[in-house]
Image (cartoon, rainbow, N blue to C red):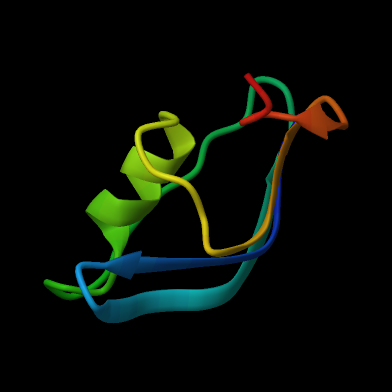
């Protein structure tokens, strides 16, 4: 299971999102929709481990997904 708890991220000097939480069960899907600049690409970069959240946790099967 992929689980996000209270994620927040900046893009440059701008706060893109905060307090973002969701859970995706094994075999499930997450659909990202929103206006330009709403944080979709930033969230994908965070999920890929390319950027770190400024707040919150990202868990994979209960373990810190960004630990390594």
Above/below status of 28 relative to 18: above
Relative placement, left or right, of 55 versus 42 is right
Relative placement, left or right, of 29 versus 21 is left
Q: Residue at x 35, y 33 (%)?
A: 50
Q: Position of residue 4 (x, y in %)?
A: 68, 51
Image-quadrant location for residue 32: bottom left
Nearest the viewer among 1 and 7 is 7
Farthest residue, direction right: 62
Image-quadrant location for residue 60: top right
User: In which quadrant is the N terminus drawn?
Assistant: top right
Above/below status of 10 relative to 43: below
Q: Residue at x 41, y 48 (%)?
A: 31
Farthest residue, direction left: 36
User: In which quadrant is the C terminus drawn?
Assistant: top right
Q: Position of residue 26 (x, y in %)?
A: 72, 22
Q: Residue at x 26, y 74 (%)?
A: 38
Q: Residue at x 43, y 65 (%)?
A: 9
Image-quadrant location for residue 24: top right
Nearest the viewer among 35 and 66 is 66
Above/below status of 44 relative to 1: below
Numbered label tally: 0
Relative placement, left or right, of 40 versus 1 is left
Q: Position of residue 3 (x, y in %)?
A: 72, 44
């Amino acid at each position: 299971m992929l689980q996000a708890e209270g994620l927040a991220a900046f893009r440059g000097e701008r706060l893109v999102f905060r307090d973002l939480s969701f859970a995706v069960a094994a075999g499930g899907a997450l659909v990202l929709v929103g206006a330009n600049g709403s944080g979709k690409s930033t969230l994908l970069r965070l999920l890929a481990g390319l950027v770190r959240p400024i707040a919150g946790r990202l868990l994979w099967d209960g373990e810190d997904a960004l630990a390594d």
